[in-house]
Image (cartoon, rainbow, N blue to C red):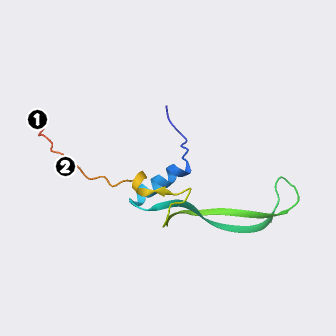
Amino acid sequence: MVINTYKFSHEELTTLALKSAGNHEGHWTLELATKIGLSNLSVDDSPHYPTMILQITGYVLQRHEAPLPHSLDASVVNPVVEEENWILDEVKL
């Protein structure tokens, strides 16, 4: 079966961002960077009304000094893993 859609929770996205950034310590939140625009728009031939347009321009990982109710501890979700030295036996074909 081919999967066409993936849905992530806010916690999962924050964890993925922490792992991608290589952060292993501190309390972090994932925040939206936004821009707001105003205009008069109409939908379906209705009268024009003042309208606010919200653009999401990016995502920001923000570090906090103390834990917050919605922050993640990088040492828990992305702990430092020591590399193991593996000895590979010679494979004879």
Residue 35 placement (x, y as % from top left): 65, 68
Q: Are marks 2 and 1 in contact (CB under 8 Å)?
A: no
Q: Quadrant of residue 39?
A: bottom right
Amino acid marked by disc 2: Asn
Q: Secondary structure at mark 1?
A: loop
Identify the residue under disc 1: 92
Please give left or right for residue 90 compared with residue 67 in the image: left
- Residue at figure coordinates x 19%, y 49% from the top left: 85
Q: Which mark is residue 11?
A: none
Q: Quadrant of residue 43?
A: bottom right
- Residue at figure coordinates x 43%, y 57% from the top left: 74
N-term mark: 2 or 1: 2
Residue 38 placement (x, y as % from top left): 75, 68
Depth order, front residue of 48/22: 22
Please give left or right for residue 18 compared with residue 29 in the image: left
Labels 2, 1: front one: 2
- Residue at figure coordinates x 55%, y 48% from the top left: 9
Depth order, front residue of 76/57: 76
Amino acid marked by disc 1: Lys
Packing grade of label 1 (10 A; few <14, some 14-19, many >=20) is few
Distance of mark 2 from mark 1, alpha carbons?
A: 22 Å
Identify the residue under disc 2: 85
- Residue at figure coordinates x 69%, y 67% from the top left: 36
Residue 19 placement (x, y as % from top left): 41, 55
Q: Secondary structure at mark 2?
A: loop
